Amino acid sequence: MASDLDTRRVADEAPILEIARDRTLPAYYYTDPAVLEIEREELFFKTWQFACHASRLSQPGRYVTMQIFDQEIVLTCGSDGELRGFYNVCAHRGHRLVEGAGQTNRLVCPYHAWTYALDGRLVGIRRGAESTAISRSEICLSQVRIDRLLDFIFVNLDPEATPMAELYPGLEAEIEAAIPGVRSFVPVPEQPREDVPMQCNWKVILDNYLECYHCETAHPDFCDLVTIPDVRHNFNDRHMHQYLPPMGKAQNAAYPLDLAEDQLDSNFWYLFPCTTIGHLPGVRSLTISRIVPLTAETSERRFTMTMIPGGNVARDKARTEYLIRGVGREDVALCEGVQHGMRQRGFNQGHYIFDPEQENFTEEGVRFFHRLYSAAVEDRLAAETR
């Protein structure tokens, strides 16, 4: 079957230059596997991707694996306490080294037992290999870049990647100012919600996350929790911040609050291309998610939740239940409804809504994302449509 790119259907009707100025991304960007393949190379293999909370690598010998599309990564904490990242592949014949997460003092390939230290050095070859004149000192695992934002560990497959502090200047301080004590937060025990599958393109999820124009229509309980009309946005080069003032109601339609103890406002950050960080009112907490494309029209949103040590776990579960059964379920239905619309012949390209006087009626966040996205992929997309 010919792809949407081959037909130039949208390119003829909505010029690429209009994207992120007056019009949204064309519908085929959300459905075509050829577009996803370009995103794989130009976005996901060249940007910082959230891996795990630092507590999972807090002791020498700990390791954690992750994937970015078909690329497998292993993160290790070495005997020196340093965190490192490697492609999860043996230098001998290319077999996967380890799976999942665990504790070890060596990475041992299950195929021929080549053995690597946690800093990536080859330290063991089975007897007899010396006859091939292999120099162990010249062989090591292929390293990937890692970086840290607060206690969140990120990886980047681009060896020339710009450090996160330069890409997202002032972000750590911004989060710390909004959420006092955030550096002491620990993962929520027995997290009930980690991976949320969604029948939609990954960009649909972000388009939904980056505006509150839909909130008063689609999230009535959420509107009883925070003051939607007073939402504020702050834009930086590659990240943005949404702030929602508190409604200040202990009893509301979402879940009960302790007005004396809880944090009552909400903050949501977006890091291009696919990371969200934020919290809802309640026990002081911070949740990070990585939006992961599985196919052109299916995705997962993978969550890691942290909270203040000693926080009220029972009350935090009430908030989590609302996130799952309430606003979360509502957003899943909205996103999947949009994905259905992207396949309809009557829809080619959407529009932005702006109201500088009422930011809850403004989709500048969506346009912000589309601008960054277009800048990253437009050359490859233009070449494909010629």
Image (tube, helix red, strand yellow):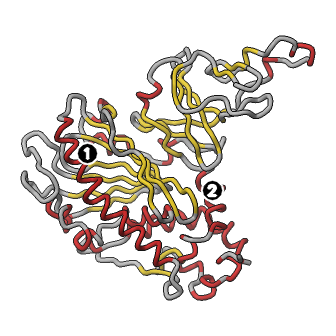
- Viewer-closest of 2 and 376: 2
- Identity, as a three-letter code, of the amino acid under mark 2: Arg
Q: Which x, y percent locates residue 79?
A: 55, 14
Q: Quadrant of residue 100?
A: top right
- Viewer-closest of 191 and 284: 191
The secondary element bearing badge 1 is classed as helix
Q: Determine the CA span between mark 1 and mark 2.
A: 33 Å
Task: Name the residue at 29% across, 71% down.
Answer: 214
Q: Which x, y percent locates residue 366?
A: 41, 68
Task: Name the residue at 51% across, 53% down.
Answer: 292
- Identity, as a three-letter code, of the amino acid under mark 1: Ala
Q: Earlier in the sequence, mark 1 or mark 2?
A: 2
Q: Quadrant of the C terminus?
A: bottom right
Q: Is residue 140 above or below residue 70?
A: above
> Which of the two discs, 1 and 2, sits closer to the camera?
2
Q: Quadrant of residue 183?
A: top left
Q: Which mark is residue 40?
A: 2
Task: Name the residue at 32% across, 73% down.
Answer: 362
Q: Residues within 10 Å of mark 1 (few under 14, many from 20)?
A: some
- Left or right of 26? Residue 112 is right
- Viewer-closest of 58 and 33: 33
Residue that badge 1 annotates: 178
Q: Which x, y percent locates residue 126?
A: 80, 14
Q: Quadrant of the N terminus?
A: bottom right
Q: Which mark is residue 362?
A: none
Q: Is residue 349 above or below residue 262?
A: below
Decide: marks 1, 2 in contact (CB < 8 A)?
no
